[in-house]
Amino acid sequence: MFSSRLDPDQRDAALKSLATNTFDVLVIGGGVTGVGAALDAASRGLKVALVEASDLASGTSSRSSKLIHGGLRYLEQYDFKLVREALHERELMVSTLAPHLVKPLAFLYPLHEKVRERTYVGAGLALYDALRGFQRALPGHKHISQKSVAAMAPSLRSDLVTGAIKYFDAQVDDARQTMMIARTAARHGAVIATNVRVESLVRDGKRVLGVKARDVESGKIITIKATATVMCAGIWSDELHNSFKLKAGYSVTMSKGVHIVLPKNSIKSAQGIILKTDKSVLFLIPWAQKWIVGTTDTPYIGDRSNPLAEREDIDYIISEANKVLKPKLKIEDVVGVYAGLRPLVANKKDSVTTKISREHTVDRSAPGFVSIAGGKYTTYRIMGKDVIDLAGIELRRIISESVTEKLPIVGADGYFALEQQIDRIAEESGLSTESVRHLLNRYGSLISEILELIKDDPKLAKPFTKDLPYLKAEIHYAASHEGARSIDDVISRRTRLAFEAQNSAMHLANDVATIIAPVLGWSIKQKKVSVAAYLDIAEREIVAIEEALASA
């Protein structure tokens, strides 16, 4: 009955639906929490809409460490409930909810003492394993000798590292998963529209009855009616509460997390590495032909829409990594940097409307208006459930319980069977087995839609660029099925060319435009505008990185 496809026709239909229907739930915000809430509500049989001012995952949800994990460091803070919850979600994603997107990833925890530290860390990781319960999609931890560490990770200093403990968490392309959750919500009836910015609330007395929003592309104002309006705005929460003249039961403090990107040959290790620092932990994460290393955790009060790394952020990451690495990382090794902002919740004690749960806060600041902030990327599904539970009260009728714990993301169905058919798919499609594996791990069973595009236009089977696995079909598909509306959407989020390709993929902008312009119905002028907009974004980020790397 409903389709997961996000294309230009779907957006046109969504805009008409937003202007003419009354929804049970309207979600503001297309980050992982917002799309998770939309999916939760739609899968309960509610009439749901979601609007996002920019692109899906355009903020925090595309700038994380790209890990699905329980939060090993939270054990030292005795936050066992949060760890148990996150580990449960990790197991669900790897095994049933999103196995095509969330992959097991081994980490080494280097040890510097032979007895006391091994006992202490081993006990912590034993607890980490135990907290996930009986569902065991990932292997348990394992003690590794100094000799084995030298073979697994030659870059770890043998004069300092006496051994290690190997354990597993999981890895995800955060922007891709967020988009796929949105597609799953659409598959269950949610009306999804990006580039729609909420400007004010529609009220009847104190009760919120919906919003007035602007279609950023056309400039038109749309009145969207909803019984419950749910705001999942993350770092924008305070600003929107103020503009809506609402007093929330919490405020959001921003924390900046910076990651550096390094070439694959800069660190020799077959596993990821986690290091304990004086402030937190540092992850050295393998990512295709790169390493992602981070993160920082520093207060931030600057521009929400354009967080940038500073030299001290980069120096901190390199300094901490160099405590155990040989040869040492150098500032010249850095090929990319990205910064994201965490929405940390500070609850107001005088509020009686705030529900504190699982490190996130759900709040009802006016009749008909509910919001949520805080939390971890890994626990997005629980956050979506909690905020819809509270929003359901506004409907004044009994609503179904959440079913998302048993609801796979689109593409998950049949994924494990398709893994066994890679050779056959390659033979029938004419693609290499490496390309089929790459596609399967990005689209799951939706690979059939990619293969259909290639069948209709065999030129789309060609690689999009040298040295990276993306096919031209994937660029086309980003606009025809995944809701991409601009060059930036494709380069920065539907793919990760922005930090995987050289020079922020500026040289690829025109090639992307050539493929997606016919799909989006662009004129020559629109094509030039989108290319120029991406080049401007990339140039500003490159200049900022160069300044950070060059500053003393």
Image (cartoon, rainbow, N blue to C red):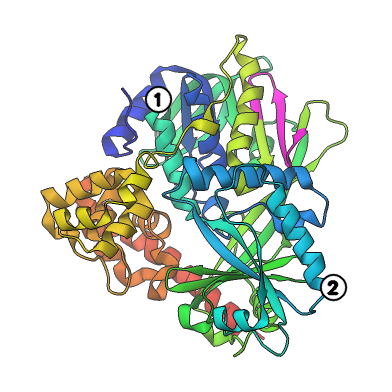
Quadrant placement of the N terminus: top left
Residue 300, given in percent of the width and then of the height, sits at 71, 59
Question: What secondary structure prevails in the magenta region?
Answer: strand
Task: Using the rendered image of the protein, determine whether residue 148 is visible from the camera's viewpoint.
Answer: yes
**Residue under numbered circle 2:** 116
Q: Which of the pair 550/92 is nearer the observer? A: 92
Task: Using the rendered image of the protein, determine whether residue 520 is visible from the camera's viewpoint.
Answer: no
**Residue 61 inside the magenta-drawn segment:** no
Please, which residue is most extreme toward the top here?
397
Query: Where is 28 relative to 393, above or below?
Result: below
Q: Residues in magenta?
A: 356-370
Quadrant assignment, res 207: top right
Q: Which of the pair 326/221 is nearer the observer? A: 326
Which residue type does callout 2 highlight? Arg
Please, which residue is most extreme toward the right here?
350
Query: Where is 273 relative to 48, above or below?
Result: below
In front: mark 2 or mark 1?
2
Q: Residue at x 63, y 20 (%)?
A: 368
Q: Is residue 90 left or right of residue 181?
A: right
Quadrant assignment, res 412: top left
Q: Earlier in the sequence, mark 2 or mark 1?
A: 2
Q: Residue at x 29, y 39 (%)?
A: 7
Quadrant placement of the C terminus: bottom right
Residue 235, given in percent of the width and then of the height, sits at 64, 47
Which residue type does callout 1 highlight? Gly
**Residue under numbered circle 1:** 189
Q: Is residue 157 left or right of residue 34?
A: right
Quadrant assignment, res 536: bottom left
Q: Which of the pair 542/343 is nearer the observer? A: 343
